[in-house]
Image (cartoon, grey):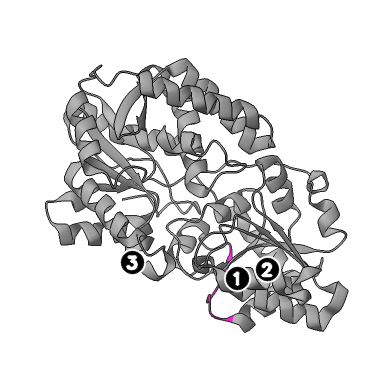
Amino acid sequence: MSRLISRAESPSPTGIDRVELIYAERLIALAPARLRYLAVVPPGRAALLPTALVEQFLDALALRWRTGEAAGTVRRLAWRLRIAALRGSFSKAMPGSVYLLLSHHHLDKPDLIAAILTKHHARLVCLMHDLIPLEYPEYSRATEPARHQLRIETVAKFADAIVAVSDTVQLALGRTLRKLGGGAATRVHSVPHGATRHAPDPSTGSLAAAIGPHPYFVCVGTIEPRKNHLLLLNLWRRLRGEMGDATPRLVLVGRRGWENENIVDMLDRSPALREVLVEREGLPDEELYPLLAGARALLFPSFVEGYGLPLAEALAQGVPALCSDIDALREVGGDVPEYLDPMDGLGWRRAVLDYLPQASKRRAAQVERMDGWAMPSWDESVRGMLAVIDGLQATGTVAAPTGLRLHHGRPEQAIP
């Protein structure tokens, strides 16, 4: 619970936050009697938390991120959990348990992980989201590659099973773990995320006034160089000069991240963008989904991703997407989205202009392709994780989860 407690002040979740909360909610629904909750408190001490208090916190946090309400309740419950952790017991061993770590939180503290596993005679199952700091260190904070290397070394040493969020991450993780030796690469499995279809009314979103009657495109994600916002900002500045007030609006949803000075300069100082750009640090789901529903398309020009949750969520709502031509996004979208080189500014320009008209044939063709696209439900995804855990608890070994399909619904694409 450490990461979710630490996110109590956040008005909206990151992708990893969203996945961790969904897992918690679905595990409560699917396997409540098997759950215990753990948090790490300074100075690096792990404690079990009161189940009822944790589940009150999870309910309040879900409400906060869904509607924007209950901020005060979330803060109060987070403080009560921190106090409970400080007063809590680390001595209650639970032999035969599995420590399920759903984020990368605290994996850079191998001694702490070892102490938890030893005390509880527990096995470790980790959900790994990406290897971006190691494979693309230029997109990370300067200290992050060394921290991520330590996380991977901790996983290699202690994890009995490693679950990757995509086949792309599974392959990358396997390559990295083979370099470390010890056979950890054989313990990596891929379990795809789920998706839930919403049916929001675009007219109910709070951004309607800011966007006005103009057609618009949406980009969802932390504002950082890896997400390639500069391509979109330069494109929209050019469109503004050519189209004037007829320029479609560009809506950016996401907090400002790191190493992004050039992007922020354009956001804050470009007069050409001022009238055609709408930026929101974060939106609760009840505002985000109506926003997506009314967009001409989701724009996803990233250079690298471990998964691509905004793409999955957009397609689940029936919203077309223009995406970078990278493996992780092709894995999520299959044949439905249009894939463009993230360096091809003219290609992105043509696509945006082609998707702009209400009677766009190019956009309609993508909407038609959605008939063949499907994803697992979140229940199916979490059951895939439970299958990994069940295998460990029953036999000490893990068979690959069966019956789960890749996201675009092709029967031949069963997960290995």
Residue placed at 62% from the left, 25% from the top?
Answer: 73
- Please tell me how many numbered marks the rendered image carries: 3
Q: Quadrant of residue 392?
A: top left
Three-letter code for the amino acid on which mark 1 is drawn: Ile
Q: Which residue is mark 3?
A: 135
In front: label 2 or label 3: 2
Residue placed at 78% from the left, 44% from the top?
Answer: 201
Q: Is the Cβ of the residue at disc 1 closer than 8 Å to that at disc 2?
A: yes
Q: Which residue is mark 2?
A: 267
Could you tell me how far apart the alpha carbons at marks 1 and 2 are, in whole angstroms? 6 Å
Three-letter code for the amino acid on which mark 3 is drawn: Glu
- In the rendered image, the vertical position of residue 243 relative to residue 309, given as above or below: below
Q: Which structural element holds mark 1? A: helix
Q: Quadrant of residue 233?
A: bottom right
Q: Is the Cβ of the residue at disc 1 closer than 8 Å to that at disc 3?
A: no
Name the outermost residue toward the front: 43
- Note whether residue 398 is visible: no
Q: Nearer the viewer, residue 202 or 315?
A: 202
Q: Quadrant of residue 218?
A: bottom right
First-in-chain label (1 vs 3): 3
Q: Which residues are magenta?
A: 336-344
- In the rendered image, the vertical position of residue 274 relative to residue 17, given as above or below: below
Q: Nearer the viewer, residue 384 or 227?
A: 227
- In the rendered image, the vertical position of residue 341 relative to residue 135, given as above or below: below
Q: Which structural element holds mark 3? A: helix
